[in-house]
Image (cartoon, rainbow, N blue to C red):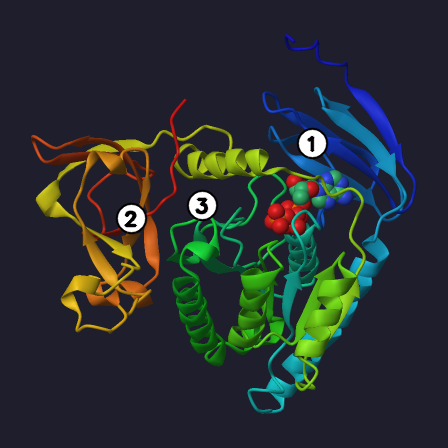
Amino acid sequence: AGAAAAPPPRQSKLEPREELRVEVPPDASLRVRLVAGTAEIFGTELPPEGWVSIPPRSKIAIFSWHGATLELDGPTESEYPSVETPMVIYVNTHAILDARRARARAAAAQGGDLEASQGPRVIVVGPTDSGKSTLCRMLLSWAAKLGWKPTYVDLDIGQGSITIPGCISATPIEKPIDIVDGIPLDMPLVYFYGHPTPSINPDVYKVFMKELAKTLERQFSGNAESRAAGMVINTMGWVEGLGYELLLNAIETFKANVVLVLGQEKLWKMLKDAVQSKPNIDVVKLQKSEGVVLRNSKYRQKTRSFRIKEYFYGIANDLAPHSNIVNFSDVSVYRIGGGHQAPRSALPIGAEPVADPTRLVAVNISTDMIHTVLAISYAKEPDEIISSNVAGFIHVTDVDIQRKKLTYIAPCPGDLPSRLLIASSLTWYEA
Ligand code: ATP
C-alpha cells in the first residue's frame, strides 16, 4: 500500500486520568500540541506551548491527571483513548519512594550511617512487554521533577534505553526525561557485553553487573544527594530459568530494596519467597498497563538495529558520522569469553577442559567484522578490559585484508581515544 494521505490536524480531549494511546508510523513523525489543561508522556509534562515532534515508530500514551485538550498533526497507525490505566497505582508507588528518599536525606543530614542514608534502590522486573522501561521512565521523571537526581541503571541488553543494545549502563537523571531525545547521554557509565542475550555468556554479564554496581557504590559513598535519590533499575524480560537466576543476581548485586513486579503473579510469588529471609527487601506486585504494545522478535531485532543506527546518525537522522581508516597494527581487538582454555588433546588423560568465561582472547581482524559494532575500551592494558567501561562505539564498514586497513564510522571525528577494542555480535546493515 502506498502512503496514505496525512489526516488534517485534529483536536482530542482527555478527561481527568484518561490517556490517548498512539502509534506513530515508521516513516513519519507526529506533532502534538497542548491546547488546554496539562498532560504528560511517560512522566514528562508536555510544554504549555508549542509543538512536540514525536519520532517515527514511537508508541506512546499522552496521559492527563486533570484533563486536557490536545492537537495532533500527522498520521498515526493507531490512536485511541483509555481511562483504564494503572497510573494512580504507579504514582502512589512514586510517592512511597519519594518519602523514602526524604527519609534518607534527613538521615544523611543527621550524620546517619550509609544504610540509613541510602534511598530506595528500585528494580523493575516482569516478562517482555509488561511496560518495565516505561515504568522506570515515569518513576525517574517524577522523581527528577521534584528535584531528585536518581540513577537509572539499565540491565536490558536486548533493547537498551540508555545507549546501544548489548550494554549494561547507568546514568544520573537530573531532569524529567526528554520526550523526544530520551535519556540524556552526557555522562553514562557503560559496560559492553556485546550480545543481545545473556545466555551467550552469563558469567560475563554477571561480572559487568558487579563492576557497574561497584562503581556506583563508590560514587554514592561520596555523594549524599545521589545516594538519597537511589536507583531505578530496568531489567530484561527473560524471567524463566537462567533469566530468573540473573534477576536474583541483579537484586543482590545492586542491593535492591524495592522489587516492582509487573504483570506476573508467578514471578512475584517466586521472588517474594526467594528474598523472604531478607527483611529489607519489599517485593511489590503492580498491574501492567493494557496500553503496552506487544513486540515480536522480528520487531525487536529491528529496533535493535535502529538503536545502533541512532547512535551514529542521531534520533532524527540529523547527524553525520565520521568515516575513518586505521591500520590493523594501530588497534588491538579482543573478545571476552574465549570458551575453553586448552584443547582436550593438550590436557592430561581424563581431565576435562576448564572453560574460563571471562578469558580475554585477541581477535584477528577479518572481513567477518564488517557490519559489526566494536566498543572502545577505557582500559589501559588488555587485562583491564573486563573491569573497564567503554568510551563509545565504532561501526566497521570495511576490512581490507591486503592493505591491512579497517574502515569504520564513529559519531565524532578524530583519532580513537584508545587502541583497545572489544568485538561483538551486534551488527547493523546500512540500508
Ligand atoms: P522489554 O521487556 O521488551 O524491554 P518492557 O516491559 O520494558 O519491554 P516497554 O518498553 O516499557 O516494555 O513497553 C513496550 C512498548 O509499549 C514501548 O514502545 C512503550 O512506549 C509502549 N507503551 C508502554 N505503555 C504504553 C501505553 N500506556 N500506551 C501506549 N504505548 C505504551
Front of the two marks 2 and 3: 2
Q: Secondary structure at mark 1?
A: loop
Image-based side of 330 in relation to 29, left or right: left
Q: Amino acid at mark 2?
A: Ala
Q: Position of residue 307 (x, y in %)?
A: 48, 39
Q: Tag on residue 423?
A: 2
Is residue 40 visible from the viewing direction of this image? no
Q: Secondary structure at mark 3?
A: loop
The mark that comes first in sequence, 2 or 1, is 1
Front of the two marks 2 and 1: 2
User: Residue 48's quadrant in the figure?
Assistant: top right
Mark 1 to mark 3 CA distance (whole Å): 30 Å
Mark 2 to mark 3 CA distance (whole Å): 14 Å
The mark that comes first in sequence, 1 or 3, is 1
Query: Which residue is tagged 3?
Result: 164
Give the residue displayed 90% in from the left and 43% down from the top. Answer: 83
Mark 2 to mark 1 CA distance (whole Å): 44 Å
Q: Secondary structure at mark 2?
A: loop
In the image, the residue with mark 3 has its CB under 8 Å from the nearest atom of ligand 1: no
Q: Amino acid at mark 1?
A: Gly
Give the residue displayed 65% in from the left and 81% down from the top. Answer: 104
Quadrant where the N terminus is found in the figure: top right
Q: Tag on residue 92?
A: none
Q: Tag on residue 50?
A: 1
In the image, the residue with mark 2 has its CB under 8 Å from the nearest atom of ligand 1: no
Front residue (pair 337, 216): 337
Q: Position of residue 127 (x, y in %)?
A: 67, 54
For the residue carrying disc 3, how many other residues have a C-alpha within 10 Å: few (<14), some (14-19), or many (20+)? many
Is residue 113 visible from the viewing direction of this image? yes
Q: Amino acid at mark 3?
A: Ile
Quadrant where the C terminus is found in the figure: top left
